[in-house]
Image (tube, rainbow, N blue to C red):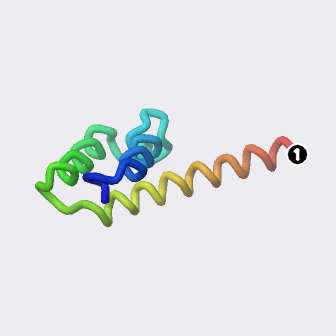
């Protein structure tokens, strides 16, 4: 899926590989980049961990956005 599906590649780049990602407060970007690269090259199947990282990042984005909106109301 991540090796060939452009939509997944784009989602990965827009979430966990984005230098502004919230997840980077907890995990170094270089470690995430290596994890994704190892998966793309077929060295390791990191699909489940990558999905968890993407899900966590999306959770952070939605939660932070929600509280920004609520604090402005």
Tell me if 63 is positioned left or right of 42 in this view.
right
Tell me if 34 is positioned left or right of 17 in this view.
left
Q: Residue at x 74, y 44 (%)?
A: 68
Quadrant that contains the N terminus: bottom left
On the question of residue 34 being in view, the answer is yes
Q: Residue at x 48, y 57 (%)?
A: 56
Residue 51 figure quarter = bottom left
Secondary structure at badge 1 equals loop
Q: Position of residue 45 (x, y in %)?
A: 20, 62
Q: Position of residue 46 (x, y in %)?
A: 24, 60
Tell me if 7 is positioned left or right of 41 in this view.
right
Q: Residue at x 43, y 37 (%)?
A: 18
Q: Position of residue 5 (x, y in %)?
A: 34, 53
User: Viewer-proximal residue, 46 or 9?
Assistant: 9
Residue 56 vertical position relative to residue 41 in the rendered view, above or below: below
Residue topped by disc 1? 73
């Amino acid at each position: 899926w991540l090796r060939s599906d452009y939509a997944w590649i784009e989602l990965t780049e827009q979430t966990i590989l984005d230098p502004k990602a919230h997840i980077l407060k907890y995990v170094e970007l270089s470690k995430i980049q290596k994890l994704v690269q190892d998966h793309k090259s077929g060295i390791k199947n990191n699909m489940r961990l990558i999905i968890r990282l993407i899900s966590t990042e999306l959770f952070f984005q939605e939660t932070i956005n929600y509280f920004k909106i609520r604090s402005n109301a």
